[in-house]
Image (cartoon, rainbow, N blue to C red):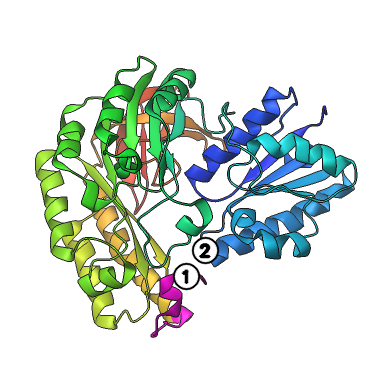
Amino acid sequence: MQKVFGMISLGCDKNRVDGERLLGEVRRHGCPITDDAGKAQVLIVNTCAFLNAAREEAIRTVIESNLLRTGVLEKIVVTGCLPQKYIAELFPALTEGDVFLGVSDCSELFPALERAYAGERVNAVGTGREGGERVITTPPHIKYLKIADGCFNHCTYCLIPSIRGAYRSYPMEQLLAEARGLGQTQELVLVAQDTTRYGEDTGRNAFVELLQKLSGLDNICHIRLLYCYPEVVTDELIRELRDNPKLIKYLDIPLQHSEDRILKLMGRRGSRAEYLALIGRLRREIPGIALRTTFIAGFPTETEEEHEALKDFLRAARFENCGFFAYSREEGTPAYRLKGQIHHATKERRVRALYAVQEAISAARLRTLVGQRVRVLCDGADFERGCFYGHASFQAYDVDGKVFFTAPRAETGRFYDVTVERSDEADLYGRVP
């Protein structure tokens, strides 16, 4: 089957890795890959289903992709979290899709397509195996390494355990081999639903051991940690972050709320006091560390007082970067049944208010960098702005803000010392002398 394949990948960076494995299967079969959906004969739509908005985006993308059949497009493959969770409803309704695969069905991509080209609509969800080889879709100097799948935290608002199952750590030797195979990598970004619990499903937490072994690889220059749950940020992990020169002094810690009553309803471990103590300790023991987190606004029964308390928490914690989301009521989760559901307009208002507080904090922090030199990893050229762009150690690629800079010339994947000339609430602007 010598068809031209394309992919539209939606959702998180963990989903991106799954998509890269599917593209690896395409490459293994010797088929060409295009990044122009209009030129694809087979288009893979890699979906997210975490929130209702993500499901709507996924379905809309498949329907809009179907319009490409007036060109060269022949088949649409719908894969990822949406069919994994909702195939019973999806398969008869989303007739634009020719093949449906789950999150771990790479091995069935080509057998299912053979059946589709013979005239069958194919539901192959849950029938295959994960792929091995990946086609990297990030710039070549930045690569993701997914160290586990699934989750056993069972937060009351979250569908992930029902989509991806219980937490499963990938074998350490497999991860080390995969990391070696990624080639020269300036920044390796570790991802999972909860990276800090790596190994616990096999009997012991081995996250720090994994960090040490990955740091020993010559082709890996720097390592960034995402999705580190606060209760598993141990003394050992703090020491490793402090002392290991390959670990970027940056930690993503999803907190979701600050107030004890809401945290308990969410099924989250920890408390406001414990979170503030952890933040203070991280800043004391690892000078210059950048902290990022996410919060949910409008969880059922959240009061205006608790919303204001969360704003005060932001002012006390002074995170470098934050994301805020309106609570999404997901059928099948314990929180779905809670009384005191909050009107969507109130949730959106609270999200905007939280962003306003954080933007003021971020803007004030970035202003302190004006006139200073910041080390920036160049990610590419912005032709509309007529400059280059990249990210500093306190900015995760494709998540946080950017540094835009001018220079006589710059190469993607190299570091530059940028003199900061101005800032806003998210980005820095400067030049390379």
Residue 62, horizontal then vertical, whole percent: 72, 55
Q: Is residue 19 above or below residue 337?
A: above
- Which residue is painted at 60% across and 37% down in the image? 129
342 inside magenta stretch: yes
Q: Main secondary structure of the magenta part?
A: loop
- Which residue is painted at 18% across and 43% down in the image? 234
The N terminus sits in image quarter = top right
Residue 416, horizontal then vertical, whole percent: 35, 25
The segment highlighted magenta reads: 331-345
Q: Nearer the viewer, residue 69 or 166?
A: 166
- Which residue is painted at 81% across and 31% down in the image? 3
Kindly check if marks 1 and 2 are in contact, taking CB atoms under 8 A apart as contact.
Answer: yes
The residue identified by callout 1 is 328
Q: Name the N-terminal-most of marks 1 and 2.
A: 2
- Which residue is painted at 34% across and 71% down in the image? 353
Residue 205, horizontal then vertical, whole percent: 26, 39
- Locate residue 112 relative to residue 246 in the image: left or right: right
Q: Residue furthest front?
A: 203
Q: Residue furthest bottom?
A: 340
**The disc labelled 2 sits on which kind of residue?**
Leu
State the SS at label 1.
loop
The residue identified by callout 2 is 51
Residue 266, horizontal then vertical, whole percent: 33, 68
